[in-house]
Amino acid sequence: MLQPSLPIGVFDSGLGGLTVARALSDHLPNESIWYVGDTKRCPYGPRKQVEVRSFARQVGKWLAKHDIKLMVIACNTATAAAFYTLQKELPVPVIGVIEPGARAACMASRSRKIGVLATQGTVASNSYAQALHFLDASVEVTQCAAPRFVQTVEEELAHGGHMHQDWKHNPEIFDTPEVYAMVREDCAPLLNKGIDTVVLGCTHFPLLSAQIKAVLGDDVCIVDPAEETAREVKETLKRRGILAASSDAVRGVHAEPTYRFATTSDDITSFAVAGKFVFGHDLDSIEHIELSELETL
């Protein structure tokens, strides 16, 4: 029997999934979170699906060993490669980010012309197009791989220059001619096609949402699957009766959520600094995971 006090497990290929963890903490302030960033093997996007599926199974099993009540695959590439596999293999409910993102995009679009901005792996899987067409068969989908976005975000955060900053309050960090040139070039397939909604099919991409919006235009709705994923998690926990309460009325105890983090990166300090920039709170409890430990799972 899963207990409401158990944490939600969240994992990503690196730091981008902290945008999902942040949405969870915003929408579910009483929930504890156990986050894993597989930073040493980031990015997942260029890798083959079979390799990404193997990584996702390893991290999924690691988190399941740490007594979680639900798992969120906060990586679009891993969701595309391993969502159904993890649902079958793990003893807890598993939620990915693709279906919630597709649903939000369908609801937002008026023209029924939707763009998907994602990694090579997610685009190649065709997972977003399938999810969108399942929701609305008449939707016209244009997919666009932006392989440089993940690397740009990870490299900017890696140098540790944003120790006391927050990406939601400091979007100008990526306001450079080089970033705008990259965004214009990589978003070119989405322009002049009547697209009115673009779903950010990678958890790193919201950090470039201001620049993406500037290139695509104010009339294009940008969908961040993190928000919709958080809502789905909340509904799932409520339906299963395992939503964390703000207090234990029987014992008269106020339940404070805890946030724990783990990374395969060898540089925990840099992970902590960059993680605070994305998550919006200090990453007080960080554990290092050796790849050899994951590879035995």
Image: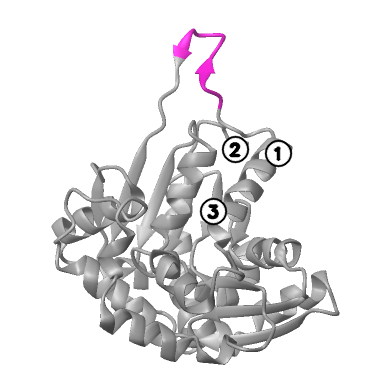
Q: Residue at x 27, y 84 (%)?
A: 178
Question: Which of label 2 and label 1 is nearer to you?
Answer: 1
Task: Please say if the residues under marks 2 and 1 sit with CB atoms less than 8 Å apart.
Answer: yes
Residue highlighted by disc 3? 71
Residue occupied by mark 1: 240
Residue at horizontal 50 percent and vertical 9 percent from the top = 251
Which element carries disc 2, helix, strand or loop?
Answer: loop
Does the image show residue 47? no
Q: Helix or strand or loop: what does disc 1 sit on?
A: loop
How far apart, in angstroms, are the residues tagged by discs 3 and 1? 14 Å
- Is any part of residue 107 visible from this angle? yes
> Is 244 on the left or on the right of 47, as rendered?
right
Rendered view: 131 above or below 95: below
Residue 2 disc label = 2
Residue 79: image x %, image y %? 57, 71
Three-letter amino acid code of the residue under disc 3: Met
Left or right: residue 121 versus residue 204 is right
Q: What's drawn in magenta, residue-wise?
A: 245-253
* Badge 2 amino acid: Leu
Question: Which percent across, then down, holds residue 211?
Answer: 40, 72
* Pointer 3 local density, CA inside 10 Å: few below 14, some 14–19, many at least 20: many
* Marks 3 and 2, the one that precedes in the sequence: 2
